[in-house]
Amino acid sequence: MRSYVHDWVTPRLAAPRAILAISILAMVAIFVVDLADGSQIWSQTLYVFPLCAIALSCPRLAWVLSGVLLALVFQVLTFVAYDISAAAVVANSIVALAADTLSVAAARVARWHFARIETAATTDVLTGLHNRRGFESVAEQEIARQKRYGGVFSLVVLDLDRFKSLNDSKGHRAGDRALCLLGSILRENLRESDSIARLGGDEFVVVMPNTHETDCAALCQQLSATIASQMEAADFEITASIGYTTCETPPDSVAAALHEADEAMYAAKAMASGLASYSRMAARQTPPTLSGSGIAIIHSAPHDVFITHERPNPDMSSRAGI
């Protein structure tokens, strides 16, 4: 019961159409009871409860106004049925409309503040992208969608190379500018359906719905070259290591999928050591391949992209997270 009430009063959790339907039925029930018990008991104030539920949970203003109009019609009909004077009907109708309007306005303000707080809680202040909490919410929704409807999605992890050196040599303000630049690059070069988040520090993650391995590899390859080119143009001597995992079946959890993409990214860093002037990408499938299988490494610079297939060196397994 407690969980049901929580979902009812939480805008993001409540299903708008269900709330609208239940609220209309509640108003019909109030109207019927009000007519049945006559003028001895007035139940007019009860209309504010379904109206507040609609105002809190339904995003469309037209639905809210329709609810207010329906409640007012029921209230006026009830006043007329009470066989009171015309002046009393008008006065009570005005009072009812004022109460309904104020209640709905208060609920809409509460909904607006809830949206602002939720956005602030899931947004990275520096880049304006999702933060870790926002990423986890999006990834959980994507996994739930995959479990219900099937399909595939990919998860991409990016980490800037030599970012600490940039902070040490040019200061943290330069590091912040580099992070903001990376955020802009990701926004401009990824699709509207992709969700981008900054996990913390210089690590970013992208959720790519309906994206197969080959499509993800192509997108990451293009992205890798773009990052290298624009960072160089901004006088930042840093590149990016990119790892991705493609989930053809639902992973056990968000953490499990993220771990796979992380391992691929660290493998790219380890295996491409010495190529500091290049952006790097590694790919790993979900579920993980058997021990000793190859990992595809893509090294890309603005004007030079090539692909190799290498087997992991046992000596670097711990550093690559394999």
Image: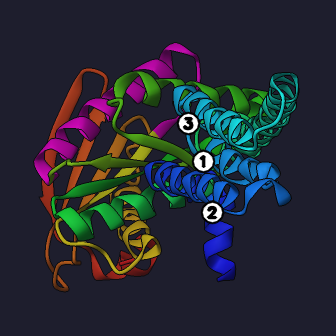
Q: Do the residues labelled 1 and 2 touch (CB within 8 Å)?
A: yes
Q: Name the residue under label 2.
A: 8
Residue at 80% of width from left, 23% of height from top? 86
In the image shown, does 224 or 11 lie closer to the viewer? 11
Report the span colored magenta. 213-239
Going by the image, does 228 lie left or right of 60?
Answer: left
Question: Does label 1 or label 2 sit earlier along the sequence?
Answer: 2
Q: Name the residue under label 1.
A: 57
Q: Where is residue 181 in the image (x, y as percent from the top left)?
A: 57, 24
Q: Where is residue 145 in the image (x, y as percent from the top left)?
A: 30, 61
Q: Sort mark 2 into few (<14), some (14-19) or many (20+) by Cα contacts within 10 Å.
A: many
- Secondary element type, mark 3: loop
Residue at 76% of width from left, 28% of height from top? 170
Q: Sort mark 1 into few (<14), some (14-19) or many (20+) by Cα contacts within 10 Å.
A: many
Q: Is residue 270 something one can see in this rendering?
A: yes
Q: Are marks 3 and 1 in contact (CB under 8 Å)?
A: no
Q: Mark 3 points at which residue?
A: 59
Q: Where is residue 1 in the image (x, y as percent from the top left)?
A: 64, 83
Quadrant in the rendering for residue 100: top right
Residue at 68% of width from left, 45% of height from top? 51
Q: Tell me which amino acid carries mark 3.
A: Pro
Q: Tell me which amino acid carries mark 2.
A: Trp
Going by the image, does 2 lie left or right of 28?
Answer: right
